Amino acid sequence: MARRRLSEAIRWQIIGMHATGASFKAIGRQLGYHYTVISRLVRKHRQTGAVKDRPQSGRPRVTSEREDRAFLRIIRREPFSTSTVLKRAWLPNRHLSTRTVRNRLKAAGMAARRVIKRPRLTDDHKRRRLAWCLARQRWNLRTWRRIHWSDESRFLLHVTDGRLRVWRHRNTAYTPRNIRQTVPFGGGSVMVWGCISHDCKLDLVTVRGNLTGDQYMRHVLEPVVVTHFDNHPLATRPVYMDDNARPHRSRAVVDYLQNNAVTTLPWPAMSPDLNPLEHVWDILGRRIQALQPPVQTLRELEAALHREWLQVTREQIRRLTGGMRRRVDAVIRARGGFTRY
């Protein structure tokens, strides 16, 4: 059984009680401690004038401060390495345990956390992103609300999260209740196209098969986008945003948009963080995963996506589209690099 430690207040109380003439045993009975504990504390107070425990040496460290600083430099250079790899890279000729490596990581305030994934950015991508944002840094909400943000997204029937963990005892990894069953390619997927702006939300469109330029015109632009834009006077006609996917930039699509007086927003490549619709896809994905009972077929998944799309409120969309100046400023501060969006 672990011994109860005396708090500093209790220690001074014991010293005071002994100073008034109370015996060791009387103090012990009153406070619930053995009289030898009381006698050792009083003796230490007589010798040192203090009641705190003296510093203890403990087990000596196997690395020096200089070696610890070298370890931190390795971490900054190779942040994705495991503790075993770090041990070999740090002091290869020294016998160290992985526990020592983890202790140094903990002492430096580091912990294993979820990795954020972003598209690969080249120097050219960063320059173009920065130039795009600098050109629109002073746009106000009145200008941003004219933009109609569009995008496609693919949703898997069965999502497999690689970060999933299970609470279990040792040697029970293959117990059926501890196994997460999977199917090849997520059991299939459904691709949808959507479009939002600060003031409206267009109909969600299911994309059958792989999206081509011809399919993009016949099933998205003609029945949804152009029809919606024709309801606006030319003076207040919206601006259409789509990314640089190959179907969006085919010659037939570009000519079709020009012939129908649809103004498009130039778009820097590798910039999903500048499109607020990406967050709407995230909302839909979380809602689909939370459905009970879960969807079992692709038809159910498609119906659920259209149903949840209708449930996205204008207030949710306006919180996203109304923050475009913050997104632009974040890219400028990052000099075209990664942002938190």
Image: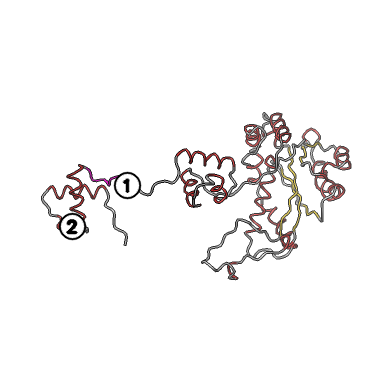
Residue 127: image quadrant is: top right
Q: Which mark is residue 35?
A: 2
Q: Residue furthest left?
A: 21
Which of the two residues, 189 or 218, is positioned nearer the viewer here? 189
Q: Earlier in the sequence, mark 1 or mark 2?
A: 2
| Residue pictured at 18% horizontal, 44% vertical | 47
Residue 27, horizontal then vertical, whole percent: 16, 55
Q: Does residue 77 show up magenta in the picture?
A: no
Which amino acid is tagged 1?
Gln
| Residue pictured at 71% horizontal, 30% vertical | 131
In the image: residue 17, left or right of residue 280:
left
What span is colored magenta in the figure? 50-56
Q: Give me the C-alpha separation between circle 1 and circle 2.
A: 24 Å
Residue 10, horizontal then vertical, whole percent: 23, 50
Residue 300: image quadrant is: bottom right
What residue did someone put label 1 on?
56
In the image: residue 220, left or right of residue 105:
right
Residue 25, horizontal then vertical, whole percent: 15, 58
| Residue pictured at 54% horizontal, 44% vertical | 90
Q: Is residue 38 above or below residue 340?
A: below
Our reading of the magenta stretch's main secondary structure is loop
